[in-house]
Amino acid sequence: MFRRLLGFALLALFTTFAARPAAAQSRAPAAKSAATAVSQILDLVPSVHRDTVAKVMTKPTLTAKYTEEPFEAHARVYPWLLEHPDRVALAWKRLNVPCVEIATAGKDQFAWTDENGSQLTWQSVAKLTDGLVWYATGKVKAATLLPMVPVKAVAVVKYPSQPTKTEGVVKLTPEASVYLLSESRAANAVLRMVGPAAPKMAEDGAEQLLFFFSGVATHLKDNPDKVPTLLAPKK
């Protein structure tokens, strides 16, 4: 299914974002509608996080957005999965799909590392009517021969839904909008190494980020009897 199922999908996403060609970086959102959307989201972020989140969202190195194909899931399950990525990673392992462990690091905070020395911590900093906002910080090393890249990022995941004929089941169309800030020279080195292949890599990373959650959600919709087993905490 995946080479490693995403370490956590954010790593794949942030790594390829940091490696996008410089030409693409100039396309940061400037349209009035985009600015308005950012402002509306920042209004929901508590003051303790607002300045750091605002810096990333208003002056990003680059942005990206991916919308997933509609799928059906239990109305209460998908939002719960977004708030518990550690349990989602555990569910993938229980389905015999390789996935690195995600550790809790406090209330609404998560962390993980990989064998290349990458370290990423993220937390939920705001809840939307149909989504949430993550703020992430850390350093990413995509491969042994690539330099370490410090990153700060904001991911806004929304999941607009429509009712279905089945009680308790909705049709979801999740979308992820990611804003990344990387100001290091190492990021420029990665840009040169990856070259024109990076935009497709970034798109794939965004797709994997959403599938990390939707894959488990759709499996549980088709196999509701497995909810207690797959989502149980680690013993």
Image (cartoon, grey):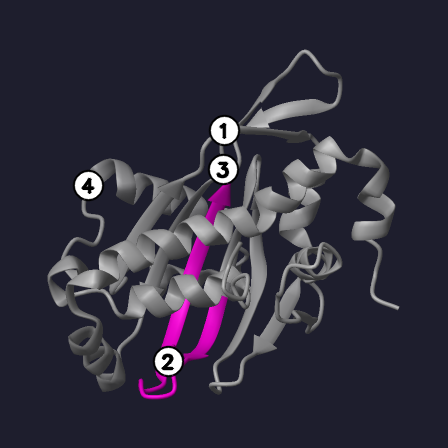
Inter-mark Cα distance, 3 to 4: 22 Å
Q: Secondary structure at mark 2?
A: strand
Q: Secondary structure at mark 3?
A: loop
The answer to which image quadrant residue 20 occupies is bottom left
Identify the mark at residue 150; answer none if there is no mark: 2
Tell which circle, 3 or 1, labels the residue nearer the N-terminal end: 1
Q: Which residue is mark 3?
A: 174
Tell which circle, 1 or 4, labels the residue nearer the N-terminal end: 4
Q: Is residue 152 magenta?
A: yes
Inter-mark Cα distance, 3 to 2: 28 Å
Inter-mark Cα distance, 4 to 2: 28 Å
Given the image, on which type of amino acid does mark 1 rest? Pro
Inter-mark Cα distance, 1 to 2: 34 Å
Identify the mark at residue 31; answer none if there is no mark: 4
Judged from this view, the residue extending furthest toward the left is 23
Tell which circle, 1 or 2, labels the residue nearer the N-terminal end: 1
The span shown in magenta is 136-158
Which one is closest to the eye, mark 4 or mark 2? Answer: 2
Given the image, on which type of amino acid does mark 4 rest? Ala
Q: Are marks 3 and 4 in contact (CB under 8 Å)?
A: no
Given the image, on which type of amino acid does mark 2 rest? Pro
Residue under the image location 65 percent in, 69 percent down: 102
Which one is closest to the eye, mark 1 or mark 4? Answer: 1
* Residue 43 visible in rendering: no
Q: Which residue is mark 1?
A: 70
Q: Are marks 1 and 2 in contact (CB under 8 Å)?
A: no
* Horizontal arrangement in the rendering, residue 8 relative to residue 142 (left or right): right
